[in-house]
Image: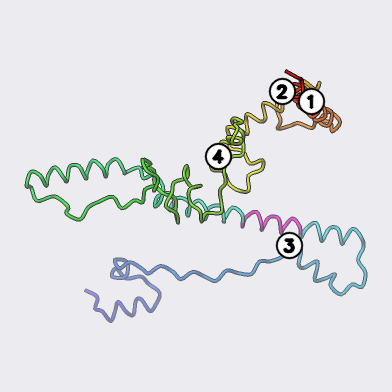
Amino acid sequence: MPTRLSLIQLNSSGLRSPMAAECPSSPPSPSPSSPMTIDGSDRDAALAKSAWLSRREVLERRCRLAKQLARVYRHHYWALMEDVKAKHRDYYWTFGKSPFKDDETAAAAATAENGKLGLGLGNSGGGDDIKRCQVTGCKTKAMALTKFCHAHILNDPQQKLYRGCQYVIKSMQSGPLKCCKPILRSTAPPLCPTHFQKGEKCLIRDLRKAGLNVSSLTNLAPKFHVIVAEYICQIQSKRRAARKASVRKVEPK
């Protein structure tokens, strides 16, 4: 049977002992990242002392460096995307809808029933620690760093990220009645997805009336004079309607 000294001697000579095989090895320390090498650096070093370079050599160097920079940016972008996916998953798990919420509710009900039966399995300090929306009657989870859900985020006077949809649903004496669904403040035009699609349909219909046959606005390149003519027609129709309304008011009774 080998002694401890013989095992140490075997380890020092580069052999692996059974004792070392059984013990888990510690994870290797991360090696420092090596500096990035520039494509064609040897050729650039050879031409570094040149006083003049031809146009072709300059363009080839710029093209090579631009391609490498684009490749580096592409790799960095996808690395950031993976990081964003991981953080979004953690965020959604913490503040979003948990797939185990129904199971937790059923388990809480079973625990309460056990407590009523006197089995000693009840939890005296339980409770729902999820923050709910502060609007009365809304049971949706509140968004992070606020007390309201996404549907009622406009009730928060301190938020700066959202604004209401500006689509006019109905004109009233007190003023236009707008949709006011929460959308990002940077959305242009300031419409929710439903009314944005409705606006596209109205625009396609007006363009067809003007003589431009289109089926979709994604690959649309309308002529400028067609759009101007349509706007002029709409302005003239509004002026005629206003003139008729004013004439009716002036007529004697």
Q: Label 4 belongs to which residue?
A: 180
Q: Earlier in the sequence, mark 3 or mark 4?
A: 3
Residue 72 placement (x, y as % from top left): 66, 58
Real-space Cα separation, disc 3 to disc 4, in angstroms: 54 Å
Q: Label 3 belongs to which residue?
A: 39
Q: Secondary structure at mark 4?
A: loop
Name which quarter of the figure residue 191 lies in.
top right
Q: Which residue shows up at 46% across the image and 44% down it?
A: 152
Q: Earlier in the sequence, mark 2 or mark 1?
A: 2
Q: What residue range appears in magenta? A: 66-76
Q: Amino acid at mark 1?
A: Arg
Real-space Cα separation, disc 2 to disc 3, in angstroms: 54 Å
Q: Label 2 belongs to which residue?
A: 205
Residue 204 placement (x, y as % from top left): 72, 25
- Foreground tag (1 vs 4): 1
Name which quarter of the figure residue 73 lies in.
bottom right
Name which quarter of the figure residue 218 lies in.
top right
Q: Amino acid at mark 4?
A: Cys
Q: Earlier in the sequence, mark 1 or mark 3?
A: 3
In terms of depth relative to the viewer, which is nearer, 134 or 87?
A: 134
Q: Earlier in the sequence, mark 2 or mark 3?
A: 3
